[in-house]
Amino acid sequence: MIDITFATKHNLSNESAESWPPIVSSADYARLRQYALNDELADELDRAIVVHKEQVPEDVVTMHARCIYVDERLGTQREIELVYPSEADPTAGKVSVLTPVGSALLGLRVGQEIAWDFPDGSVRRLKVAAVSQAAR
């Protein structure tokens, strides 16, 4: 694990996610590795900065965080809670980390955006507008 001080001292929130790796807590990382069959999630975990839970900045999309994101291609905004697959309930806004949106948003900071391939063949640009952390 590394110290997240560099990322916190530098204003990385306005950069695209392609230029800065996602930030994931060590506990979430270990649990998410169980879902290695999902190639997109595995790719994101491979490039993630893994830190202690206390070092994850408050503006990062983590497991059980609520976030508002903008789909810039569709021009829509949505609020979701990022959850593990067994907790998913789309009608309640609980989106599995194994969905395209869930895998794309994991580890992003407010202001970051990422281009992501969707199953219908489209590429969407998702941008994190706000994050609200669950009780730590």
Image (cartoon, helix red, strand yellow):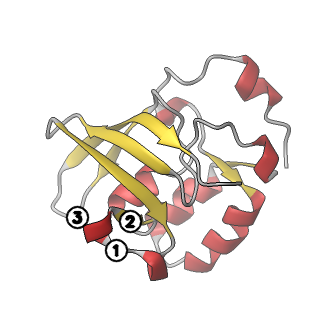
Q: Where does residue 93 sit, x and y in percent of width and height?
A: 33, 62
Q: Which residue is mark 1?
A: 89
Which is more N-terminal, label 2 or label 3? 2
Q: CA distance from mark 3 to mark 1?
A: 20 Å
Which is more N-terminal, label 1 or label 3? 1
- Decide: few, some or many residues near mark 3? Use Cα within 10 Å; few <14, some 14-19, many ≥20: few
* Residue 130 higher or lower than 85, as above or below: above
Q: Quadrant of residue 114?
A: top left
Q: Residue at x 46, y 50 (%)?
A: 66
Q: Quadrant of residue 42?
A: bottom right
Which is more N-terminal, label 2 or label 1? 1
| Mark 3: amino acid | Pro
* Residue 31 higher or lower than 62, as above or below: below
Side of 55 relative to 86 (left or right)? right
Say whether marks 3 and 2 touch (CB < 8 Å). no
Which numbered mark, 3 or 2, is in the foreground of this view? 2
Which residue is more in the foreground, 12 or 85? 85
Say whether marks 1 and 2 touch (CB < 8 Å). yes
Which residue is more in the foreground, 7 or 78? 78
Q: Which residue is mark 3?
A: 119
Side of 102 relative to 76 (left or right)? right
Q: Which residue is mark 2?
A: 94
Q: Where does residue 122 sit, x and y in percent of width and height?
A: 17, 51
Residue 71 is tagged as none
